[in-house]
Image: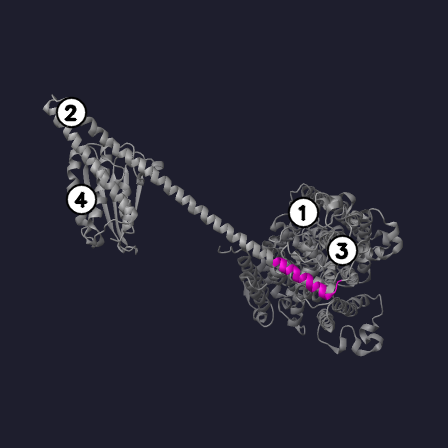
């Protein structure tokens, strides 16, 4: 199950996701700052969420070299 | 407000449109043209995850606790990252063994245990009931908001038969019945339904985005405006911080994310859509990101709507859960509100229909059928077709489940927020995770372990979450909640063993999963799994390692085809069974059903097909009732496995051999083709050479014969003839020389005398030796060369030969008197490039490839006689010998440009001489 490159990338990505969406990395966003009109906390959550999707697209839709 | 009739009419029209889509989808599926065979449809149908909870509840949640609505959607995001590893395995297992429900999946893994299937079904029914209640509550309160005047007070119905929620439940039951139980399908797939669900996902997303846009840009001036205004009100601003005074806030956050991660896989409707209804494993590749993207989009406006609503209504008593409706209504946007209501209806109906179909299948296959089949009286009476009975049981189950949902709605629903009700259900289905995930990756998990884990986890869930929810609504005494069971302090359901500080959901999730996992692992390790458990564990855990041909069949005994055919007919229908058996006969190479070999493979084939219709546990009982089985020992399992893997090894070796044989054949074929074409080339060459030699010989012979026959020939004529003879003889010797030259070069016997030469010098020599031909035809030769060119390592004579060939060709092509030929020399670090350009008629593109072939003279050449057709091929051979290449660029009427490139450093093609 962990032999393929895709599998390893997925596992790494899921660990990254768990790390970024929990304590303590999540606490970094809990500040009274506004970005593009959004409060930092929801902005950060949506940003991480969006980046995870982009990374997932990259892993899943990447064509194999051969 | 809107008229109730309008709302009801539009709702019905919408539901019928959905039904039409489903009907169309089913018809297309029957015709073999699936309309759902697309990863996009698959991804959209997964969004059945977004129910009234998302649609109404999230806004309510956001209005009371800010970003705390999000873990429910971040969990699925994380799950989907791993879906390609985990869900693909579930799909493969379910497809291989015809598993159609989560109860069947777990039961089948642990030795097809009917007890386990029943337990999982009971947990599902009890666990999902609150979730159904949530949908009913949401849609009925939505309906009330739509049809009540803005400042009016919602009256609760005085008598039960005027309660709109009851009718809502009945209508949904009706639609579920026509969507899901029109006919019996042995694989429990509903293509039309999936198409309708995908459409519903689009509708609810569009409706939610529409109201989000309206609130953000219609009522307010964009998101920044909402957040700016919110930051001015302290109570609302407080919502934008993380913990908001919670203790263990990050633990709660983690628990909720984990809960959603598990729920998105183990909710019956998600299992149905993701695993059972999956058309092609490969669709998962795209769906894993389409679904999270959908979730992101539908959540973008949740916070703006919630905060906007809070700012807009201020202190007015408006339920935040219906902001999506009350905001447009308050602004007089009735049509938008109606569209949003239809979106909400999509969310509710999609969830209810798929969820209840999935549960009704489980209730029928895993709860009712095993009981009926054990009943001897039923067994005696039920000789005939049972398909109608199966459908009837499912329909009753559908109505029953919705009525239970309605009951819970009255018991506990009114006191709770939508999200809190939903979380109770999430915690219930999370109990499946140890047994199911453990079963997929751990061979030692046993039936008893799964039973212990599930029942203890479920009991803990009831005690710490379900009962308190009912107690808090006032239906049972709250004493056990406040004082503990029997007044024992440490048995308090929400502070079990004195664990305080956690909220009740995290508390319950921790205890139930902890006890569940502990019991599952401990009991599994208590004693060795039985033969049947081992065989099923092997089939599940190693599903990717088994090829179709070497699938081990764990069964031994004697069976009769006729008995099995009769059995299949009872549950699948007579016709369908006949067709299945005929196909199977063809597959195993028997000409008739009677001649099918009565072996373990046949028994397994029938059992697998029955599993699709009545579940693995019931199928096992039924097959066992008509065949003569021998009990399987652990040794037998190991022996069968050994045989299968040996068979597999043989087939792999065989495949390997046939592949290498194929490879060798292919190589030989290629070599043969090469030889043949070389042979053809040689023949062509010979005939060309002889033909070319004959032409000058013929004219020499004609001239000399004429002179011989006529001794009185005039001196002038004789001289003319003699000069022709000399010219032809020269041509002949040139031809012979060139043929020899060519042959030498091709054979690699040519002599090369390479040294450092000045290319400018060579060009000068060539031009001076050919200038007379240019003068004769009145053609101008222009040289475009740099002043100095570094020396290049090559054979001077050979290069002059090439230059002369190109220049003489050019002069032949250039028109007489108006002709012009240009010679370009370019120098670079890599090498030199020479191009000779004439202004003649040019060469058609289709002929350009031919000019470098032997004896091909290009048409349009004026004095055809002097060419041998070997000049260019030899030139190219020479250039290629020095590692360069030669080309031709030309168009009709534009002249021709022959050129070559000679590298400074010759690729190491050792100079033989």
Of all chains, the one bearing label 2 is B
Tell me where residue B420 appears, x and y as whole percent.
73, 64
- Left or right: residue A7 versus residue B673 is right
Q: Is residue B691 magenta?
A: no
Specify start and end residues of the magenta stretch as a single range: B632-648
> First in sequence: mark 2 or mark 1?
1
Of all chains, the one bearing label 1 is B
Residue B153: give its label: none
- Left or right: residue B138 versus residue B258 is right
- Type of secondary structure dominating the magenta stretch: helix
Q: Is residue B733 visible?
A: yes
Q: CA distance from mark 3 to mark 2?
A: 109 Å
> First in sequence: mark 4 or mark 2?
2
Q: Secondary structure at mark 2?
A: helix
Q: Are marks 4 and 1 on the same chain?
A: yes
Nearer the viewer's eye, disc 4 or disc 2? 2
- Image point (17%, 36%), residue name: B773
Which residue bears the numbered disc 3?
B615
């Amino acid at each position: 199950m962990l032999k393929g490159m895709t599998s390893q990338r997925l596992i790494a990505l899921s660990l990254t996701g768990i790390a970024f969406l929990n304590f303590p990395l999540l606490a970094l966003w809990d500040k009274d700052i506004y970005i593009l009109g959004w409060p930092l906390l929801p902005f950060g959550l949506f940003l991480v969420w969006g980046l995870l999707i982009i990374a997932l697209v990259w892993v899943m839709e990447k064509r194999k070299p051969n | 407000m809107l008229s109730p009739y309008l709302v009801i009419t539009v709702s019905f029209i919408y539901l019928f449109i959905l039904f039409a889509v489903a009907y169309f989808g089913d018809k297309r599926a029957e015709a073999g043209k699936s309309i759902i065979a697309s990863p996009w449809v698959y991804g959209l149908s997964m969004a059945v995850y977004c129910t009234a909870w998302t649609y109404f509840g999230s806004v309510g949640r956001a209005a009371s606790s800010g970003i705390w609505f999000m873990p429910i959607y971040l969990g699925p995001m994380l799950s989907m990252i791993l879906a390609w590893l985990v869900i693909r395995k579930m799909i493969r297992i379910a497809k291989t063994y015809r598993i159609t429900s989560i109860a069947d999946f777990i039961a089948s893994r642990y030795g097809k245990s009917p007890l386990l299937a029943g337990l999982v079904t009971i947990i599902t029914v009890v666990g999902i009931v609150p979730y159904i209640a949530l949908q009913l509550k949401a849609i009925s309160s939505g309906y009330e908001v739509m049809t009540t005047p803005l400042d009016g007070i919602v009256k609760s119905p005085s008598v039960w038969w005027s309660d709109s929620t009851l009718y809502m439940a009945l209508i949904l039951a009706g639609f579920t019945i026509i969507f899901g139980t029109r006919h019996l399908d042995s694989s429990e797939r509903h293509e039309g339904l999936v198409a309708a669900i995908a459409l519903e996902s689009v509708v609810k997303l569009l409706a939610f985005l529409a109201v989000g846009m309206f609130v953000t840009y219609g009522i307010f001036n964009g998101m920044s405006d909402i957040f700016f205004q919110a930051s001015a009100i302290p109570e609302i601003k407080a919502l934008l911080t993380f913990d908001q005074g919670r203790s263990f806030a990050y633990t709660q956050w983690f628990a909720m994310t984990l809960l959603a991660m598990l729920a998105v896989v183990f909710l019956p409707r998600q299992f149905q859509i993701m695993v059972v209804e999956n058309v092609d494993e490969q669709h998962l590749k795209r769906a894993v990101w389409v679904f999270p993207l959908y979730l992101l989009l539908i959540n973008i406006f949740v916070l703006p709507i919630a905060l906007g609503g809070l700012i807009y209504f201020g202190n007015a008593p408006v339920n935040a859960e219906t902001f999506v409706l009350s905001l447009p209504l308050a602004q007089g946007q009735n049509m938008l509100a109606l569209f949003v209501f239809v979106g909400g209806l999509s969310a509710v109906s999609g969830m209810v229909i798929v969820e209840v179909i999935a549960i009704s299948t489980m209730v029928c296959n895993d709860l009712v059928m095993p009981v009926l089949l054990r009943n001897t009286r039923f067994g005696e009476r039920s000789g005939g077709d049972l398909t109608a009975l199966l459908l009837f049981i499912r329909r009753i189950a559908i109505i029953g489940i919705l009525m239970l949902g309605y009951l819970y709605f009255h018991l506990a629903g009114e006191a709770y927020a939508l999200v809190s009700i939903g979380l109770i259900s999430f915690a219930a289905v999370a109990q499946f995770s140890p047994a199911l995930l453990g079963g997929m990756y751990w061979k030692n998990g046993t039936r008893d372990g799964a039973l212990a884990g599930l029942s203890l986890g479920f009991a803990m869930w009831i005690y710490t979450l379900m009962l308190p929810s009912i107690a808090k609504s006032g239906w049972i005494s709250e004493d056990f909640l406040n004082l503990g069971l029997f007044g024992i302090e440490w048995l308090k359901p929400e502070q079990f063993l004195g664990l305080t500080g956690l909220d009740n959901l995290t508390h319950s999730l921790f205890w139930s999963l902890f006890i569940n996992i502990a019991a599952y692992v401990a009991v599994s390790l208590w004693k060795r799994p039985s033969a049947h458990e081992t065989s099923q564990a092997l089939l599940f855990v190693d599903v990717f390692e088994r090829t179709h041909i070497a699938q081990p069949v764990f069964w031994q005994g004697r069976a009769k085809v006729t008995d099995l055919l009769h059995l299949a007919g009872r549950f699948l229908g007579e016709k369908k069974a006949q067709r299945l058996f005929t196909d199977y006969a063809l597959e195993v190479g028997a000409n008739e059903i009677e001649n099918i070999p009565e072996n373990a493979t046949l028994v397994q084939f029938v059992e697998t097909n029955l599993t699709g219709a009545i579940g693995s546990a019931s199928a096992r009982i039924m097959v066992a009732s008509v065949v003569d089985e021998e009990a399987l020992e652990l040794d037998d399992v190991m022996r069968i496995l050994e045989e299968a893997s040996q068979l597999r090894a043989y087939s792999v070796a065989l495949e390997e051999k046939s592949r290498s044989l194929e490879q060798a054949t292919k190589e030989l074929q290629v070599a043969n083709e090469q030889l043949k074409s070389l042979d053809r080339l040689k023949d062509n060459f010979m005939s060309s050479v002889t033909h070319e030699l004959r032409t000058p010989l013929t004219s020499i012979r004609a001239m000399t014969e004429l002179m011989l026959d006529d001794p009185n020939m005039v001196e002038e004529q004789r001289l003319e003839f003699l000069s022709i003879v000399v010219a032809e003889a020269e041509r002949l010797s040139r031809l012979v020389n060139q043929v020899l030259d060519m042959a030498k070069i091709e054979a690699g016997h040519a002599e090369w005398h390479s040294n450092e030469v000045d290319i400018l010098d060579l060009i000068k020599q060539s031009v001076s030796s050919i200038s007379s031909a240019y003068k004769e035809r009145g053609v101008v030769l222009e040289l475009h060369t740099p002043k100095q060119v570094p020396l290049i390592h090559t054979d001077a004579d050979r290069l002059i030969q090439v230059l002369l060939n190109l220049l003489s060709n050019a002069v032949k092509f250039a028109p007489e008197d108006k002709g012009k030929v240009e010679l370009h020399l370019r120098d670079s670090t890599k090498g030199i490039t020479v191009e000779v350009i004439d202004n003649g008629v040019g060469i058609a593109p289709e002929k350009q490839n031919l000019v470098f072939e032997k004896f091909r003279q290009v048409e349009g050449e004026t004095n055809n006689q002097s060419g041998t057709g070997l000049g260019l091929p030899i030139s190219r051979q020479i250039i290629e010998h020095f590692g360069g290449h030669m080309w031709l660029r030309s168009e009709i009427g534009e002249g021709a440009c022959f050129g070559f490139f000679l590298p400074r450093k010759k690729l190491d093609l050792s100079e033989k001489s």
